[in-house]
Amino acid sequence: MKRYLLVVALAATDLFTGWTLSIASADSLTVVNPNFANVAVQCSPGYAYESSLGGNCESPGPQQAFNSSLGIGWTFASISSGSSTGLTNPNTNFEPPPFTGLPFSVAAFLQGDSAAAFGQTITGFVPGGLYTVNFYLGSRYTYGGYNGNQTVAATIDGQIVGTWALTSNTPFTLRSLPFQVGTGGSHVLSFVGTVGGDETAFVSGISLETVTTLTVTPSTGVPGIGLVATAGGFTPFETVNLIAFAGSPTPTTIGTATADASGVANVAGHLPQTPFGACGLQAVGQSSGAVASGIMSVRARISVSPNTLAPGDAITVTGYGFAAGEVVISELANPATLVGKPTAGQNGSFSFYFLLPPSPAGTDEVLAQGQKTGALAGAEITVQ
């Protein structure tokens, strides 16, 4: 029976209000916003919505700056001559295939050649790991000068791992592609249109499954949390190291144990500083060379120091488990007051301080939300 993790993804409208719940399998790498559901499509109905850094609701388009939308996860290529990418609802002038009965109501489109692309940095890979990318793919439902004769390529770090040649009127169909990676850590998954001209394909419902042979308890946690990884198949009584692949491909040994008489090892360690998503783990037998792989899902957390203070006092906020390079909006909850906009580093952490503004005595909370992932964390403070 599959285990499932409850992942909270916030909507793209108000900073800490509307939210959407999505379910991610515990044996999958985290794909932020796989169905493009957490972006408010705001312009005129009956259109697709092209990605533009200077987004607006005017023709051509309409255009929207999806790359800066809260919780979007994906990075879209900007509009260029002869190609574009963005989002569409069903029944728009772009004539996407029907969405009826599908697990999404928004899809990304790829129109034109390689300038039409969107991608996301995915964490948690292990070297040599076996993965399957699953997604729904369809083509434009129209003829004449506008058609769906597009070829879509899936790439990892710019290297093509699979292509699908479409013709007009192809309904949304679930596609699956197995692949391997040579290094652990983070890799960029992208979808690219390869045919020039007004040829349009649509993509949604994206997931990344992995074959796991290592059981990790708990299956999700914040950086620094203790964990136990369990696997068998080792030589009795051999030393087994637990290795973590966080945001970078450089491995970190986080625990060591001795396998028991049946070759089972229970290795304890702590989740290292790693970006939002997942941390890849491998247990490696030091004499047998046997390897077992798994993942631990990573969520954000913040800490504050001091946590008891008076208005005018300085307070330091430290965050962990956000996406590398994402802006993190930080607020006081009562009353809602912006206190900082730090940017997370490569390992998903940040630190900044602010002076506590005039606030009512009692309990308050500092909230921090990543603007790329929608990852949300809070820490309680006491105002004297």
Image (spheres, rainbow, N blue to C red):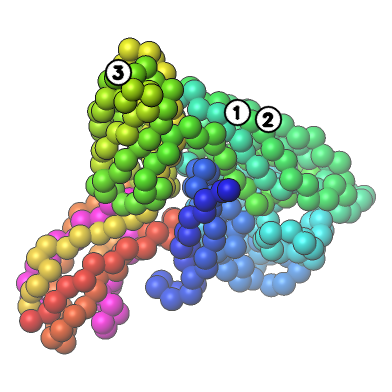
Q: Distance between the residues labelled 1 and 2?
A: 9 Å
**Which residue has dot 1 on it?**
179
Amino acid carrying mark 1 in the image: Phe
Q: Nearer the viewer, mark 3 or mark 1?
A: 3
What residue appears at the point 48 percent right and 59 percent down from the top-left corner?
Answer: 6
**Which residue has dot 3 on it?**
238
Q: How far apart are marks 3 and 1 (CA)?
A: 31 Å
Amino acid carrying mark 3 in the image: Glu
Q: Residue 347 at x, y = what percent?
A: 30, 42
The kind of secondary structure element at disc 1 is: strand
Q: Which of marks 1 and 2 is in front?
A: 1
Q: Are marks 1 and 2 in contact (CB under 8 Å)?
A: yes
The kind of secondary structure element at disc 3 is: loop
**Which residue has dot 2 on it?**
162
Q: Residue furthest bottom?
A: 360
Which stretch is magenta? Answer: 311-338
